[in-house]
Each structure stands twice: as C-alpha cells, then as structure tokens.
Image (tube, helix red, strand yellow):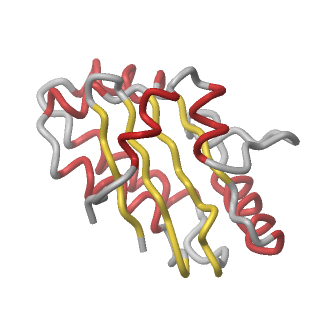
Amino acid sequence: MYSYKAFFEEGVLITRFYNEYIEEEGDKSLLAICRSMTIDQRLSIKTVIWDLKDVTAMSVVNTDIARVTHFERELLKMFKPHRESAAQHVKRIQIFHIPPSDKAVANIFRERLERVAHDSRKTPRIESDEPRGLPELLESLNLLKLLPLLDGEWQK
C-alpha cells in the first residue's frame, strides 16, 4: 500500500509505502500517480523519493527485465507528444529511498534493485550510509522546507 505527496514547485514526488510491498508496487504506484498529473506536472518532477521505512514484507516476485521494459514503455506513453524530451527528462530524475526498517525486508529490497538494474534503468542509489528517515534525507537534499508540509493528508 502507498500514499504520496507531490510538490510541483520544488519538483519533488514523495511516496510512502507501508505494510506489505506487493510485487512491483513501486512502478505501479508511479504509473498511477503520473496518470493523475497533467503533462506539465509530470515534467516538473525532478526528484522521486520512496519511503519504505514502514514496509513489513516484500518478495522478489516480478523483478525481471521484461517487466521493467514494459513499465518504462508505459511511463513514456504518458508524455506524448513530448516523448523524445520525456526520455531525457526521465533519465535526469534523481531517485532516492528510505530503506525498510526491518533488515530482512531491506535486504530483499536491495536484491530487487539488483535484479532489475540495467544501463537504462534508473534505480534508487544504495549507499552504506542510507538515511534512516525522511527528515534526514530532506536535509541532505536541502529540502527541509518540505518537512512541515508532510503533516496532514497524503493522497492515495
């Protein structure tokens, strides 16, 4: 399950995942969220943050390159007639994540990323000093001004 907040002026999309992360939920959520946006809103996004801290279960189901290729095709279709520039835009998007708190689930998340990684696939960076929460990540990105805006309703 997920909820999200978009900050178009800052070019930031934050998605919080919680409970069980089912199959390719990250990609499915991104497609659903993008469908709800205008083309200008889609093009405004420069940073995507996945907060997986509250994910309690995950598997490696649907972590093959064919599924990823399908996702990428579906995403680019949403940018018509700007498809050429959209491909360049998508390549420039920075993707960050807050790993699941549960170490076993975090390891599965890392394995998922490794399985779908290829040259054109942009996946969240894996670092030994991953941020442990959204405030820490927002601070590192110089986006602390968004912190108070995270209170209240998230879209589902």
Q: Is residue 34 left or right of residue 54?
A: left
Residue at point 36%, 41% (across, down): 149
Determine whether 139 is above or below 116 in the image: above
Query: Position of 76 compared to 127: left or right?
Result: left
| Residue 120 lies in quadrant | top right
Horizontal relation, residue 3 to residue 104: left or right: left
Q: Residue at x 49, y 65 (%)?
A: 17
Quarter residue 101 falls in: bottom right
Foreground of the two, 2 or 76: 2
What residue appears at the point 35 percent right and 23 percent down from the top-left corner? 10
Residue 51 position within the rendered picture, expressed as x and y whole percent measured from the top left = 55, 54
Is 40 above or below relative to 20?
A: above
Pick the front one: 145 or 81 = 145
- The residue positioned 66% from the left and 47% from the top of the image is 117
Picture coordinates of residue 132, whole percent (x, y): 73, 50
- The extreme right residue here reads 128
Which image quarter is the N terminus in?
Answer: bottom left
Residue 127 placement, left or right of 31: right
